[in-house]
């Protein structure tokens, strides 16, 4: 089968990647390879694994302006290039040119139902993934299958017109670990992720947990995308966001990774940080729930509902390093045995084939 995946990457990551002016001068294929090799969104990308499974794949980073301009230069005549195209128009042209059997929108707010309706080539199956806050104006009715990892977002997808919904989880690519090198433990615990209006619970938890751990002498790392307007201490502690392999390295340098899911997620919901932390061998410490829908609390991860309990749990684990290492090793083993990306790609194909 021919499978087309469209994903959107964070603008700050793309800006950093293209600070090297030679990247924009490379071919479309070379730019895609460079972006995928960076490890950004690696737990969502299925296209790198499809050729080995007997399928033809096309990767579209729909909001990457230099990449999409390169595709136009390689595809159109000079006369057609002068017409000007929006990013969504370029994406539609790529779909028409590739003529996929399966169209997979990792971001269905970018490749949406209205665009699908305009396509001359009609894929056999249109698939969406959604596990994030979504505006009520988004229409999922154009997708044959919508995937999500969280019961809260299942209900949201239903309200947005999703016709068929299945649970599906991201994963961790094994190749990432081989690119991190031998790293020494630099932190006892880190937090890496976004902070802002969609993360009020996260910000409140960080404002309580991180100062308390620092006061107990723990080596704390904070790598946040965003700022803490009411907390100069955390702004001073924050070393800024890390993306892709740089983010994985930070997690691997930490004995524990603190995780607080987005406000709209289910209390026991899952996010990418679960797989990223477990995948590199860091113990995932969740704050806000006593259970986890993928990893078993107490033996494969740690979960506490309240901030005070989370602090106590972390301090206890620091006093019992063998227990900490045992739980982390169990979580890593579970992640690689069931959620390595080749396995997740096979599962994605099974879900698609069931609908087809």
Image (tube, grey):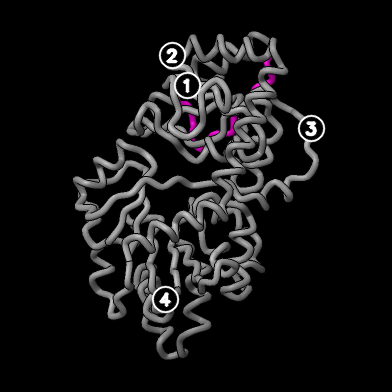
For marks 3 and 4, give the CA distance.
44 Å
Q: Of callouts 4 and 2, which one flags the residue occurring earlier in the amino acid sequence?
A: 4
Residue 99 in magenta stretch: no
Q: Of callouts 3 and 4, which one flags the residue occurring earlier in the amino acid sequence?
A: 4
Q: Residue 304 in the image: state x and y as whole percent.
A: 47, 17
Q: Nearer the viewer, mark 1 or mark 4?
A: 1
From the viewer's perspective, is residue 106 above or below residue 67?
Answer: above
From the viewer's perspective, is residue 203 above or below residue 338?
Answer: above
Q: Which mark is residue 184?
A: 3
Characterize the local packing of mark 3: few (<14), some (14-19) or many (20 or more) Cα atoms within 10 angstroms: few
From the viewer's perspective, is residue 232 above or below residue 246?
Answer: above
**Badge 2 element:** loop
For marks 4 and 2, give the CA distance.
48 Å
Q: Is residue 149 left or right of residue 73?
A: left
Instruction: Please give the range of residues in magenta.
Output: 218-228
Q: Is residue 82 left or right of residue 183?
A: left
Q: Residue 63 in the image: state x and y as whole percent.
A: 44, 61
In the image, what residue occupies the spot 49% across and 18% down? 207
Quadrant in the picture for residue 115: bottom left
Quarter of the figure with the C terminus: bottom left
Residue on which disc 2 sits: 306
For marks 2 and 1, give the CA distance.
7 Å
Q: Nearer the viewer, residue 33 or 316?
A: 316
Q: Nearer the viewer, residue 233 or 224?
A: 224
Q: Of callouts 1 and 4, which one flags the residue occurring earlier in the amino acid sequence?
A: 4
**Badge 3 element:** loop
Q: Nearer the viewer, mark 4 or mark 2?
A: 2
From the viewer's perspective, is residue 349 above or below residue 173?
Answer: below
Q: Is residue 292 left or right of residue 130?
A: right
Q: Which mark is residue 287?
A: 1
Residue on which disc 4 sits: 94
């Amino acid at each position: 089968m021919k499978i087309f995946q469209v994903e959107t990457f964070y603008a700050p990551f793309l800006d950093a990647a293209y600070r090297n002016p030679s990247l924009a001068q490379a071919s479309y294929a070379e730019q895609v390879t460079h972006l995928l090799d960076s490890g950004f969104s690696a737990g969502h990308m299925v296209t790198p694994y499809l050729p080995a499974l007997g399928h033809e794949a096309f990767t579209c980073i729909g909001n990457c302006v230099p990449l999409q301009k390169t595709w136009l230069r390689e595809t159109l005549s000079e006369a057609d290039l002068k017409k000007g195209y929006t990013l969504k128009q370029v994406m539609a042209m790529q779909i028409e040119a590739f003529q996929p059997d399966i169209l997979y929108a990792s971001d269905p707010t970018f490749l949406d139902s209205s665009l699908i309706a305009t396509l001359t080539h009609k894929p056999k199956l249109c698939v969406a993934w959604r596990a994030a806050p979504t505006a009520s104006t988004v229409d999922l009715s154009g997708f044959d299958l919508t995937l999500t990892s969280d019961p809260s977002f299942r209900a949201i997808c239903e309200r947005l017109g999703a016709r068929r919904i299945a649970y599906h989880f991201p994963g961790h690519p094994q190749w990432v670990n081989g690119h991190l090198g031998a790293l020494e433990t630099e932190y006892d615990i880190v937090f890496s992720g976004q902070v802002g209006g969609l993360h009020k619970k996260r910000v409140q938890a960080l404002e309580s947990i991180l100062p308390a751990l620092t006061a107990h002498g723990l080596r704390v790392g904070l790598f946040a995308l965003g700022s803490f307007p009411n907390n100069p201490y955390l702004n001073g502690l924050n070393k800024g966001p890390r993306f892709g392999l740089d983010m994985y390295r930070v997690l691997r340098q930490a004995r524990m990774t603190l995780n607080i899911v987005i406000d709209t997620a289910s209390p026991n919901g899952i996010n990418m940080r679960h797989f990223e932390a477990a995948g590199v061998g860091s113990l995932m410490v969740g704050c806000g729930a006593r259970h986890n829908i993928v990893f078993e609390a107490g033996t494969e991860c740690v979960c506490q509902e309240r901030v005070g309990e989370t602090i106590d749990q972390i301090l206890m684990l620091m006093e019992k390093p063998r227990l900490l290492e045992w739980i982390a090793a169990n979580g890593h083993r579970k992640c690689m045995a069931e959620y390595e990306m080749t396995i997740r790609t096979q599962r994605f194909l099974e879900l698609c084939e069931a609908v087809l």
